Amino acid sequence: MTIFQAWRDGIRRVNEAPAILFGVWLMTALVSLPLALVMRGMLEQHLGASLAADAAARGVNYDWMQEFGEQAAGLGLALRPTIIGFGAVLDNLSAFIDNEHRPLVVGGAALGYVVLWMFVAGGIIDRYARDRATRAHGFFAASGVFFFRFLRLGVVMGIVYGLLFGYVHTWLFGSLYPRLTHDLTVERTAFFVRVGLYLVFGVVLAGCNLIFDYAKVRAVVEDRRSMLGALRAAAHFVRRNAAAAALLYLADFVLFGAALGLYAAAAPGAGSSLWSTWLGFAIGQIYVLARLWVKLIFWASETALYQGRLAHAGYVAAPEPRWPESPAAEAIERS
């Protein structure tokens, strides 16, 4: 199977299972809802019936937002101008690549979200591997079977990502970057050095993510119980198919970049009226759907590439045969 075939087949498998996309969007919304309700309570308590409340209802009040941020704690620290529109994407990206810490309550919600993804991952990959509807009972059965296996895999992932962000990131930007830019007098050169280090760290991070993705795929498709064995098998597959796996990952990443670009062009700024606020919310949710769609395409296309390169019929159930709807078939069935 070629890279383009795997990519196209992955998109097809995702589009043929819209219930999965809707389900993960709903899961994302439900995880975010408690945080939104807590933030709403904090804002209501701070504003009360003041004139600032009327100004906030008419549109974004930056002066009040700065005042709120000076006295806020915990989740309230997340309320700042950078969370409006596409700024929220840039703020999260900056925090990710610079290894910035978020408030504890946000980190707890993110951890719970990751655990939920570990639960549904088995059912999602199983559905894409079978390439046919598995219904709710089949989906949740597969999710339950692989949940504890993926939890064990998650421990390894946590250790690896912890080393990457705790040591490699610190060494690159805390030790190597100052040494490389110590004698530089041109700020632009220092900027390019930092971008180069970002690329190095990004490649290492993407490589680890790629191996972990194929470990999940091989665990589901081959019904592996040992996650260390799945990791070894995934590393072997990636090594034997390095060009195809990397180019497919890059193609999926370009699709993610396209979603980001469209959102950057369409995302509104601070709304000055109620309808513009709701419009911004609707566009934001469309972006969330697009981002989740791309995430699912990563798994579906990687599953398609693996099945096209290595898997045989015994690894996973084939699509259920459909009896042809024709008079001849009906006659045979009656006989």
Image: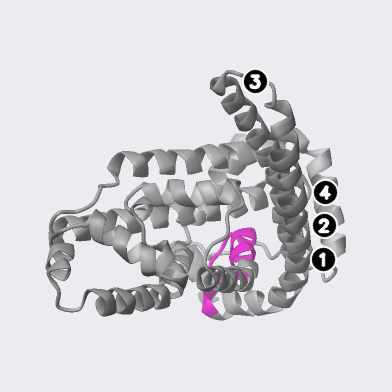
Indicate the secondary structure of the residue bearing disc 2.
helix
**Residue 199 placement (x, y as % from top left):** 65, 34
Query: Is 36 placed left or right of 294 in the picture?
Result: left
Q: Is residue 181 above or below residue 120?
A: above
The disc placed on residue 235 is 4
Per the image, the residue denoted by label 3 is 184
Q: Nearer the viewer, mark 2 or mark 3?
A: 3
Q: CB under 8 Å between callouts 2 and 1?
A: yes
> What's the CA distance linking mark 2 and mark 4?
6 Å
| Rendered residue at 55%/76% (across/down) | 335
Q: CB under 8 Å between callouts 1 and 3?
A: no
Q: Is residue 111 above or below residue 191?
A: below
Residue 224 vs residue 59, the one in the foreground = 59
Q: Which residues are magenta?
A: 123-136
Per the image, the residue denoted by label 2 is 231
Q: Is residue 129 magenta?
A: yes
**Residue 190 placement (x, y as % from top left):** 61, 25
Amino acid carrying mark 3 in the image: Leu
Indicate the secondary structure of the residue bearing disc 1.
helix
> What's the CA distance linking mark 4 and mark 3?
40 Å
Where, by quadrant of the figure, is residue 286 drawn? bottom left
Query: Is 243 placed left or right of 143 in the picture?
Result: right
Per the image, the residue denoted by label 1 is 227
Chain-order first, disc 1 or disc 3:
3
Residue 81 vs residue 256, the one in the foreground = 81
Amino acid carrying mark 1 in the image: Met
> What's the CA distance linking mark 2 and mark 3?
42 Å
